[in-house]
Amino acid sequence: MDIDLPLWSKIAWCVFIVLWAGLRWQPNVRSRRHGIKVTRRPLKEQISLAISFSGLGLLPGIWVFSGLPSALNYSPDPLMFAIGIVLFAVSLVLFRLTHKALGAMWSNSLDLREGHQLITTSIYSNLRHPMYSAFWLWALAQAFLLPNWLAGFAGLVGFGTLFFLRIGQEEKMMEMEFGESYREYVKKTKRIIPGIY
């Protein structure tokens, strides 16, 4: 009996999305209880969020539920499927650790909450942006898991756009808020890959 890998890829992607949404639910509710002190949501931020959503959610979702664009399908590979599953699992663990460490300080945009604190413990002791690390792993997992050139690789382009347009602004905002404490923290940590970048 042959295994229908494209079907299992679609199921795996859907399961991941449901698990990710579940992980996000409580931190989202908790963080909304704390008012926003500072927000930076220019048009560029809103556009980059829309592009990221398109790459990580909309385009793969269209392929998963409609099979379109089928002309961009390629033959699935069991090894790529397995790598995709592992990367998705690791990204979920990172999302969980990040949300646990941030608590109510979490935001999905460039916001600082009332009483915002600089988190430098747990997963943040080595990485300044483990949430972005988790999103990069999601995008990479999607590329391995979904055997469609558009649906699979849209996440790398979509999230990559958000990351490169946002990261400098976010770090500048944190430096303005926390000053020397943040500058010292930057010296001791990497952005998204421990010991490398």
Image (tube, rainbow, N blue to C red):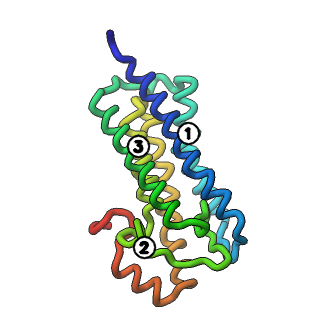
x, y percent for residue 151: 48, 35
| Separation (CA) of disc 2 from disc 3 | 24 Å
x, y percent for residue 33: 71, 65
Residue at the spot 68% in from the left edge and 77% down from the top edge: 114
Q: Which mark is residue 60?
A: none
Q: Earlier in the sequence, mark 3 or mark 1?
A: 1
Nearest-to-viewer mark from 1 and 2: 2
Amino acid type at mark 2: Thr
Tag 1 residue: 18
Q: In which quarter of the image is the N terminus?
A: top left
Tag 2 residue: 121
Amino acid type at mark 1: Val
Q: Earlier in the sequence, mark 2 or mark 3?
A: 3
Amino acid type at mark 3: Phe
Q: What element carries label 2?
A: loop
Q: What element carries label 3?
A: helix
| Separation (CA) of disc 1 from disc 2 | 28 Å
Residue at the spot 35% in from the left edge and 81% down from the top edge: 187
Q: As displayed, is residue 85 above or below residue 90? A: above
x, y percent for residue 150: 46, 35
Assess disc 3: are there few (<14), some (14-19) or many (≥20) residues with their C-alpha within 10 Å of its C-alpha. many
Tag 1–tag 2 contact (CB < 8 Å) = no
Q: As displayed, is residue 78 above or below residue 157? A: above
Tag 3 residue: 88
Q: What element carries label 1?
A: helix
